Image (tube, helix red, strand yellow):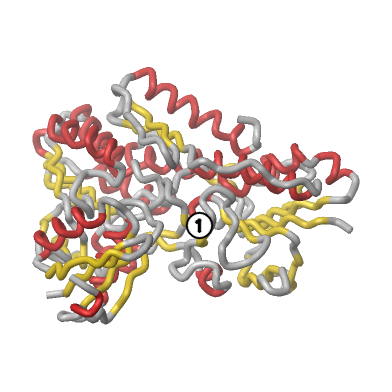
Amino acid sequence: MSETDVRADVTVDAVGSSCPGPLMDLIGKMKSVDSGTVVELLSSNEGTEDDLVEWTEQSGYEYLGAVDRDDHQAFYVRKS
Amino acid sequence: MTERIVIVGAGTAGIVLANNLADELADEIDAGDVAVELVNDTEEHVYKPTWLYVPFGEKTPADATRPLAPLVDDRVTLVIDRVDDVDTESKAVSLVSRAETRPYDHLVLAMGAQVTPEETPGLAEGGHHFYGPAGATALREELSDFTEGHLVVSVVGVPHMCPVAPLEFALIADAWFRDHGLRDDVELTYTYPIGRAHGIEAVAEWAGPLMDERDITVETFFNAERVDPDDEVIHTVEGRDLDYDLLVAIPPHDGSDLVRDAGLGDDGWVDVDPNTLEARGADDVYALGDVADLPTSKAGSAAHYAAGALADRLASVARGERPTAEYDGKTVCFIESGTDEATYIAFDYDESPVPKEPSKLIHWSKLGYNQSYWLTARGVL
């Protein structure tokens, strides 16, 4: 996907955090937003994508994809 | 002119730093060139790992505390007061009781972490925890009456103090119920927020099979959204429900409003350089221990080693030298894996831990360290 494919409502900046920090920051934010909200998670941790895909499968939230940036990735999730 | 180093918080991080500085800068302090001030809001020092043993009747909250003053080097000025504001522009902290501000040349924030069970609806009413003397004592009462049913150990908040403590609690509880002849009547479940039993992969790989062997059910990707204390059910973000008879939760943790208000970290943890421990949001401010947002564990061990490195750095700066010491993330944690056995892990920013085979020897080493901790607080070990 590209930057233009999705517009995030909220951004969670977890660049520099080690596992499980990025996923936990995202889950914490998910608890407080409304259904339909798209959350952008910024992470430089290698394991984030696998954890995130697995968690969205378990939770029923929608994983929209990722965008590579210079020193991190941006992941997009929609709350169901 | 005297160079003033002010340390806020006299937990493991603050007290080890203060005592190490007193030792390293003894001559400069005696000459009046350097002053080290340690500010704490109580007159006691607490060794928090003691609380893990309280629910099982092995320790009391009194075992965890000692008067602070005798543990602090005479060269350090101990101030019992609460800091309610940090002004990084004018380089001063405000003390509540004295209604005054104290200037600093170097400020070290070491206020630790706070548990916030109220952040999860129903958790404070429906759950117990062992992250404090009152909670650990109440849990001891519950456990002493608990002869059958479903005990759930649920990690609700990450990061939290002592990352291995939830595993320890579950493994000790298993052994404790066996020791009391109750294990067949007690169902044990351990829950963790991500897809394995622990944040550190090597610990999860070690703990997973052990939990299986001990008949402890492990639920992963389990994030409590709310607790229903009347029906005794945990409802999760993932849409699952779990019944319990006794809930032992690791509550969400928070850093400090002081940090947020000072612009040093939006989430309450101080944003620092992981090697130099310098705050990124202000000059001449450092953070140590749990309040620092470091890519290692919120554990006394990490605070201890980080304090040693920061003492070296600050001593160099006070002498007008370029600081070269750095914290490499070194952490060494014992892990109790029953009532009479334990293992340990040692790691840093680059090296992952490898848990050793649990043994009685390591368990007794841990009990020995619990006694000798007071030498760590004094900066001796």
Residue drawn at x 49%, y 28% as measured from the top left: B369
Q: Eyeballing the image, is B96 above or below B135? A: below
Residue drawn at x 55%, y 29% as measured from the top left: B372
Residue A24: which quarter of the image?
A: bottom left
Q: Looking at the image, which is closer to me, B92 or B141?
A: B92
Q: Position of residue B81 (x, y in %)?
A: 66, 62
As shown in the figure, which amino acid type bears the numbered disc 1?
Val
Quadrant for the N terminus of chain B in the image: bottom right
Q: Looking at the image, which is closer to me, B58 or B15?
A: B15
Q: Eyeballing the image, is B134 above or below A74? A: above
Q: Do we see residue B67 in this rendering?
A: no
Q: Eyeballing the image, is B235 above or below B179? A: below
Chain for numbered disc 1: B
Q: Is residue B149 left or right of residue B156?
A: left
Q: Do we see residue A58 in this rendering?
A: yes
Q: Position of residue B352 (x, y in %)?
A: 36, 36
Q: Is residue B344 left or right of residue B370?
A: left
The residue where tag 1 is placed is B291
Q: Residues within 10 Å of mark 1 (few under 14, many from 20)?
A: many
Residue drawn at x 32%, y 20% as measured from the top left: B359
Q: Looking at the image, which is closer to me, B47 or B343?
A: B343
Residue B299: which quarter of the image?
A: top left
